[in-house]
Amino acid sequence: MKHTIFLLLAGVLAFGQIQGDTKQRARAARDLAKQGEMGIPKLAPYVTDTDVSVRVEAVKALDEIGGPKTVDLLVKAAGDTDAEIQIRATDGLVNVYLPGYLKTGISGSLQRVGDSVKAKFTDTDDQIVDPYVMVRPDVIEALGRLAASGASLDSRANACRALGILRGGAAIPQLGEALHSKDNQVIYEALIAFQKIRDPAAATRVTFLVRDLDERIQIAAIGAAGLLLDHEAAPDLREVIGRTRNPKVRRAATSSLAMLAEPSDHETFLRDLTDMDDAMRAAGAEGLARLKMPADRPVLEKAFMSEHKLNPRLSEAFGVVMLGNRDTSEFSALRYLVNTLNQKSYQGVALAFLVELARQQPVRQALYPLLTGATRDEKIWLGTVLARSGENDSVPYLEAMSMDSDNEIAQAGIRDLRSLRARLP
C-alpha cells in the first residue's frame, strides 16, 4: 500500500514538473521575440518541441520578429502537423514578403478548442506582392504542400490564399488539387489564387467549375476563366448566360466572354451595349473593344457620349480608346479614364483599363504628356500603369517620378521603376 502511494505521489510530482517545464519553455519562446533578430537562432529548438503549445509560441515569436531571417524556421514550422501552427507559419511567410499582412491575415482570428482550430476568412482578398518581389522556391513548395494536404481545411484554404498573394505559379498543380476539394472555402481560395497568378497555361483547370451550384464558387470560376483566357470555357459561359436566372452570374459570364472576345459573340456584345443593366452595357463595350473592329468605333463613341452611369461609361471609354481614339482633350475618353483615377470607388476599374490600353505604344505616348500637371493620385496610378504595361520608353518618366518633390509620389516612382525593370528583358 505504501509502495503504491509512493508511486502515485511520484507520478503526480513528475507530471507537475513536466507541466512546469512546458510552461517555462513556452514562456521562454515567447520572451525570445523581445530579442528581435538575435532571438531567431535560439527559437530553433522550440519550433520542433514535443509540446504543441511551445511550438505555437515559437511561431508567434517568429511572426512578431518578422523579416527574411525568419523564413527558414517558418518553412520548417509550415511542415508541422498542427493546423494552428501551419496557419501562423503561412501568415508569417506572407508577412515577410508583404509587410503588414499579419494585421489582415486569418491568424489573428484563430480560436482553439482542444485540438480543433477555427479561423475567420474575410471576403477581402485583393493583396498581392509587387512583380519584382522574388519569393524563395522552398516557401512556395511548403505552401503548395499545405494547399494540397494541410492538417485542416482552414490551413489548406489559407495556404491557397497565400499562394495567390505571393504569385506562387510553381504550386499550380497543388492549387489544381485544391479545386477538387469538398470544401467550398478551399475551392474559392484556390480560384482566387489562379486569378492572381494569371498563368494562361492553367486555364483549363478551372473550366469544370463555371457551372458549379455554389454561387460564390461559380462566379469566381467564371472570373478566372476570363482572366486566364480560357477559350475552352466559352461554350459553357454561353450556356450559363442562356440558362441562369441569377443576374450576378449572368453579368460575370458576359464579362468573361468579353475578355475572351471571340468574333462569334460580336452580335451579343452589340445587343448588350443597349441593355438596361449597367453591368451588361459595360461588358458589351468591353467585348467590342477587344474585338477591335473599326466599324464599332462610332457605336462606342455614341454610347460614351450618351451614357450617364459611371461604370458602363468607363467601359465605353476603354472601347473608344482601344479602337484608336487617343485624343486627350478635356472631354475625351482617354482623359476621362485618367481623371477617374482620382475617384477612390472607381480607381481600380480605370486602372485595369489603362493597364490594358498602355500595352500599346501609341497609347503610352498619349499618356506621357498627361503626367505634367497631373494630380497626386493620377501620377501615382499612372506610374502603376507604366510599371505593369510600359516598355523601355517608359523608364525616363518613372525615373522622373522617383525624384518628385512629393515624397509619396517619389516612393511610388521608385517602386514602379523596380517593377518595370524586373519585367524588361
Image: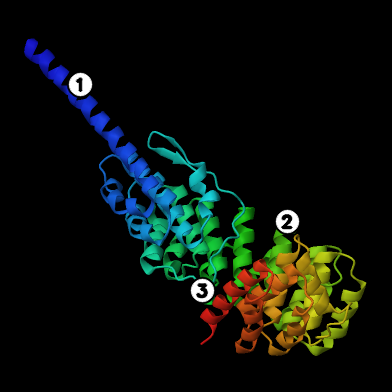
Disc 3 is placed on an element classified as: loop
Q: Name the residue under label 1.
A: 12
Q: Name the residue under label 3.
A: 132
Q: Are marks 2 and 3 in contact (CB under 8 Å)?
A: no
The residue lying toward the viewer, choosing from 169 and 219, is 169
The disc labelled 2 sits on which kind of residue?
Asn
Q: Do the residues labelled 1 and 2 touch (CB within 8 Å)?
A: no
Q: Residue at x 87, y 71 (%)?
A: 274
- On the image, which quarter does residue 144 sit in? bottom left
**Label 3, residues with CA under 10 Å away: few <14, some 14-19, many ≥20:** some
Residue 316, can we see it? Answer: no
Q: Residue 100 carries which label?
A: none
**Viewer-nearest of discs 1 and 3:** 3
Q: Which residue is drawn at 43% across and 68% down?
A: 135
Residue 88, can we see it? Answer: yes
- On the image, which quarter does residue 392 sit in? bottom right
Q: Name the residue under label 2.
A: 246
**Label 1, residues with CA under 10 Å away: few <14, some 14-19, many ≥20:** few
Check the picture and name the quadrant holding the N terminus: top left
Disc 1 is placed on an element classified as: helix
How much space separates mark 1 and mark 3, taking CA atoms? 57 Å
Q: Give percent across and percent down for residue 397.
A: 66, 83
Q: Which residue is drawn at 45% across and 68% down?
A: 172
**Viewer-nearest of discs 2 and 3:** 3
The disc labelled 3 sits on which kind of residue?
Tyr
Q: Which of marks 2 and 3 is nearer the N terminus?
A: 3
The disc labelled 1 sits on which kind of residue?
Val
Residue 99, compared with residue 324, is above or below; it is above
Q: Give percent across and percent down for residue 70.
A: 37, 57
Q: Is 195 situated left or right of 337 in this image?
A: left
